[in-house]
Image: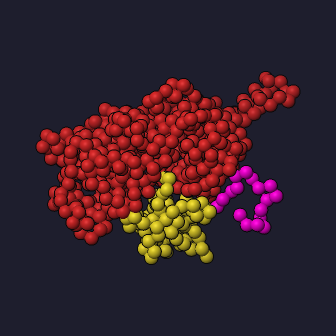
Chain colours: A yellow, B red
Amino acid sequence: MSGENKPANPPAVPQINVEEKLFQNRYRVDTGRPHIRIRDERVCGGCDAKPCTVCCPAGCWRIEDGKVDLVTDGCLECGTCRIVCEPKNVDWNYPRGGFGILFKFG
Amino acid sequence: MSETVSEKFDAIVVGAGPAGNAAAYTLAKAGLAVLQIERGEYPGSKNVQGAILYSHALEAIIPDFRDSAPLERHIVEQRMWLLDESTSYTGAHFRSEEFNKPPYNRYTIIRARFDKWFSQQVRDAGALVICETTVTGLLKNEAGKVIGVRTERENGDILADVVILADGVNSLVGQRAGLRPDIAPKDAALAVKEILFLPKEVIEQRFNVSGSQGVVIEIAGSITGGMLGTAFLYTNKDSLAIGVGCILEDMKKQKMTPAELLERVKRHPAIRPLIEGGEMKEYAAHLIPEGGYNALPQLYGDGWVMVGDSAGFVNAIHREGSNLAMTTGRIAAETVIELKTAGKPFSAANLAAYKARLDDSFVMKDLKKYAEAPDMLLDNPHMLGMYPDFLARSAQTMLTVDGIDKRAKQREILARLKQKRSLWGIIGDAYKFWRAFK
């Protein structure tokens, strides 16, 4: 929460955005080897709904300059993007063994 | 890798969650040569659950689990709450001293800790457990029988007489081998959760418990923004687990992100005072296969069986999953042991005994009982939205003392209901509800 937008009386449970949530997690990122890929960017361009950008719990799927942008570093490996993508344009794999999210509590 | 696992195993278990651990433990205990492969750094590092442990399922596998398992609190009270968007809640609480007598029926657990413990029992029973290794496919012979697994490691092909697929809700291994279709958006709920740390005494005061007693709160209503879903708040020893899950078919049609939805739950005035000051230490997400009986895939074939979430064994209505996972894992293992002992091959015809045993157990009986419930609720979103809100507003009207007479208040409530739903609509809803839950 930035200083400028701080409400006069902060709520008892401050609202936190997804980046702050992910900051608490432990990851071992497999640098340069994203485990999820967009099969064909043109297909995303023709998709009106872009449900991946709403449903991803880690905010990995964003719209940048009108295009669907995927950054898998914060991925929680749930599988949602693969399932909600109607044209099946998501090439979804698990990270290599030992990489990716490491839940401390689960 | 080729040096450590050059031999052929009686059974390979893919995955070290509750289903895989139940299977591997049961097999190893019976003296079979078992290899279990887990992609996480340690068992539990990829696993997420609320989490409630149902004792009966684990007792059937490890009767004295209470002596060594990392358990948080035993449940003495269940609260069922209906929350509207941001104002009120209606609820029922059930607390019983019967739940306070050992052996306890349900516990809260922290999965990363619990799964590590369970895996240690599997190793102690004699299974070989390999972590940090992802199974990428199944090996088949010319006849199409599954004869082992392929891993991403160099020389990573490993042979076994039978493969138990316990690789979780995404079930990639089974899908890629053509054993099952991908899970449909209407059959999968995405749940997000946070763990919030608070001093033990604060939790005990806020939830009216002491010692190792705990409370679970299951939540439905328009808090989920019209999506079919539920939220939960569970008490651990010195932390709270709070989460919310909704069916993807509904989630993809709207604009609220899962993280925002969870914030909305946390902000609700019925929840906020209970979690206030909690230090968030992890944010997790996981899919839950909620399609029930009608979404179950083929459960066995030549050289393979499917257990737990990978086959969709979840009773969404009763919020049960890990007990179905452990039970299906155990029963699959018992079937394998029986065939092995009798010297019979692991053919589809012989492994059909797994399905027959499940049919005889609470697993299939419960899933069949609620077979129509998931689709009915998805097709009738007002069941978990409009009616609870109506109930809350009615209570608000009746309990507000303002000089208006009670009959007039009743007329107002009735008029409000008629505005929302016709008499035939209400009768139809009641019938649909009865049909799906009878």
Work out whether B120 lies above or below A99: above
Residue situated in front as seen by the camera: B222 or B328:
B328
How many numbered callouts?
Answer: 0
Residue situated in front as seen by the camera: A26 or A96:
A26
Residue B421 x, y percent position in the rendering: 65, 36
Question: Which of the image's four quarters has the N terminus of chain B?
Answer: bottom left
For the point 44% across and 30% down, which residue is it?
B103
Residue B327 x, y percent position in the rendering: 35, 39
Residue situated in front as seen by the camera: B146 or B10:
B10
- Describe residue B229's horizontal placement relative to residue B132 as left or right: right
- Describe residue A96's horizontal placement relative to residue B234 as left or right: left
Q: Please report the bounds of the magenta region as a residue range.
A: A1-17
For the point 44% across and 37% down, which residue is it?
B54
Residue B35 x, y percent position in the rendering: 26, 54
Work out whether B241 lies above or below B143: above
Q: Can residue B37 be seen in the rendering of this structure?
A: yes
For the point 66% across and 37% down, which residue is it?
B205
Can residue A8 be found in the magenta stretch?
Answer: yes
Can residue A23 be found in the magenta stretch?
Answer: no
Where on the picture, by quarter, is residue B273? top right
Residue B358 x, y percent position in the rendering: 31, 37
Work out whether B359 lies above or below B280: above
Q: Can residue B309 be seen in the rendering of this structure?
A: no
Q: Name the residue furthest left.
A: B343
Q: Main secondary structure of the magenta part?
A: loop
For the point 40% across and 38% down, which residue is it?
B67
- Describe residue B384's horizontal placement relative to residue B10 as left or right: right
Q: Name the residue furthest right.
A: B403
